[in-house]
Amino acid sequence: MEIVAVIATIILVATLLTLIFSFAAYFVTRAKKLLPKKTAKPENEASEDPATRIYFKRYMINEPTASSGHKVKGEADQWM
């Protein structure tokens, strides 16, 4: 066989296998979505509070870091 025919055959087989695997993956993914969920929710999940977002305040050098008025250990020489 000529080299061109061999390369063309390899490309054709690779393309067909790619199509077959892509359709198989599509149908498997679709079947997973359609099947009913067998896992039950844990009982303690319903009693927990919903998740809340935590926002952090930007650290500014000029503002004191302690809210109660006392000096935080190492605050004075932090940038020395």
Image (cartoon, rainbow, N blue to C red):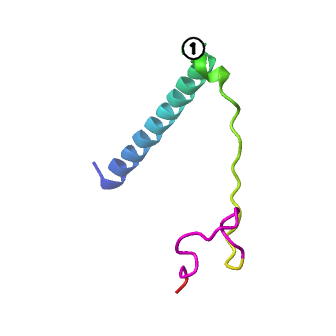
Which residue is tagged 1? 40
Residue 53 relative to residue 11: left or right: right
Q: Residue furthest bottom?
A: 80
Magenta span main SS: loop
Up-down relation of residue 23 to residue 73 (above or below): above
Residue 79 image position (x, y, % from top left): 55, 83
Residue 26 relative to residue 13: left or right: right
Residues 46 and 75: in front is 75
Q: Residue furthest left?
A: 1
Residues 6 and 2: in front is 6
Residue 61 included in the magenta stretch of the image: no
Among the 4 quarters of the image, the one containing residue 57:
bottom right
Q: Residues within 10 Å of mark 1 (few under 14, many from 20)?
A: few
Tell me the residue at 51%/30% (across/down): 25
Tell me the residue at 62%/23% (across/down): 45
Up-down relation of residue 46 to residue 15 (above or below): above
Amino acid at the residue labelled 1: Ala
Tell me the residue at 56%/27% (across/down): 29
Residue 68 image position (x, y, % from top left): 70, 62
State the SS at label 1: loop
Residue 7 relative to residue 15: left or right: left
Residue 41 image position (x, y, % from top left): 59, 17
Up-down relation of residue 80 to residue 46 (above or below): below
Tell me the residue at 41%/42% (across/down): 14
Magenta span covers which residues? 63-78
Residue 29 relative to residue 14: left or right: right
Q: How many marks?
A: 1
Residue 74 included in the magenta stretch of the image: yes
Residue 42 image position (x, y, % from top left): 57, 18
Residue 41 seen in the figure: no
Residue 69 seen in the figure: yes
